[in-house]
Amino acid sequence: MMPIALFLSTVTGTNGQSTLFPGGPAAAKLSHLSWFVLILFLIVSLVMWALIALVATRPRGNFEEHGPVNAGGGQNFIVFGGFTIPAIILAVVFITGLSATSAFPVHDGGTHMPAQIRLMGHQWWWHVRYVEGELDQRVLTANEIHIPVGRPVDIDLESVDVIHSFWVPTLHGKVDLVPGQVNRIRIEADHPGVFRGQCAEYCGAQHAHMILLVVAQTPEEFQNWLSAQRAPAADPATPQQAHGRDLFLSRACVVCHTIRGTGAAATVGPDLTHIGSRIGIASNMLSNDDANLAAWVTHAQSLKPQSAMPNVTQFTGQELRDLVAYLRNLR
Ligand code: CUA
């Protein structure tokens, strides 16, 4: 149900990926600015078209009927209509735009409070670290950021490879993730929901499949999520899952991924300690279910060519089912 709900909400915009349905104060500010500029220039356009229509339909005459070219209000009309009025309109737009964007605490160069989240761009996924609190309380996850409703959350943006761009249009504008530099964005959601984001800077073959979800929750739900994420991985609940874990730890998976609480501690790919709790896999290109997970393990290069995830094909059918059963239990 979750993928269908997500798809519908993306289309209708209420919880999805749309600048037209702001879900937080920053996006609301940007939305108001857009509507203000749009309506203002619509009015200007209508006046211009009315003047053009007037000139086009005006009866022709000769010099005797119209008098000398510069007589009457002609000069004044050109000075006011062609210079003064446009200057006032453009100044108003300029100042309104400046005051809207200056309200955003981005790029404030080291004087700011520590961020709550560090987001690292990879080709082509998002590495999420919650850095609030003690070191051993930190949370690692991927492609999904949870935030409490009604509270501003600062995110430091970095990249390990090329330039990516953070863009969750329902919550804010864009800020780039630039290698060797830390940028910042402050997001806040005013209602619970799943807000879809998209890397907004072309970053290679799978740029379009670099999707980020922001899940805004009530403060209680958020705290529960955070506590669950802090815990080490769940132990296998069945012999099948135990077999799946053994496979994970003895095959290629362990070369790239971490599952906290087991021997798997590599950091090439996303942390899988709570992979079963996530909405999507493959940077939210696929919904998180048994079939997609099995397909992703064995055919990642067909689904997402050039991604760092290889086709891991050394499983029998039963082994693959056991592995998927284990991973899906990691909630
Ligand atoms: Cu990352 Cu486009």
Image (tube, grey):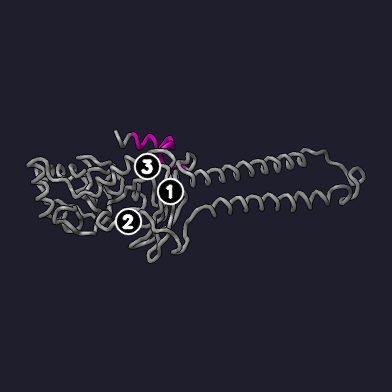
Three-letter code, disc 3:
Ala
Residue at the (87%, 50%) spot, across then down = 69
Label 3 or label 1, whichever lies nearer to me, is 1
Task: Tell me if residue 151 can be seen.
Answer: yes
Quick check: is 17 in the magenta stretch?
A: yes
- Relative to residue 224, is residue 311 drawn left or right? left
Of pointers 2 and 3, the one earlier in the residue sequence = 2
Mark 1 residue type:
Pro
Instruction: Give the CA separation, mark 3 to mark 1.
Output: 11 Å
Quadrant position of residue 117:
bottom left
Q: Kindly identify which residue carries mark 2.
A: 131
Among numbered discs 1 and 2, the one appearing first in the sequence: 2
| Residue pictured at 47% horizontal, 39% vertical | 21
Q: Name the residue under label 1.
A: 152
Please report whichever mark, 3 or 1, sits nearer to the chain's N-terminal start. Answer: 1
Nearer-the-camera pick, 154 or 290: 154
Q: Is mark 1 on a helix, strand or loop?
A: loop
* Residue at screen point 35% across, 43% down: 215
Q: Mark 3 points at which residue?
A: 216
Q: What stretch is highlighted in magenta?
A: 5-18
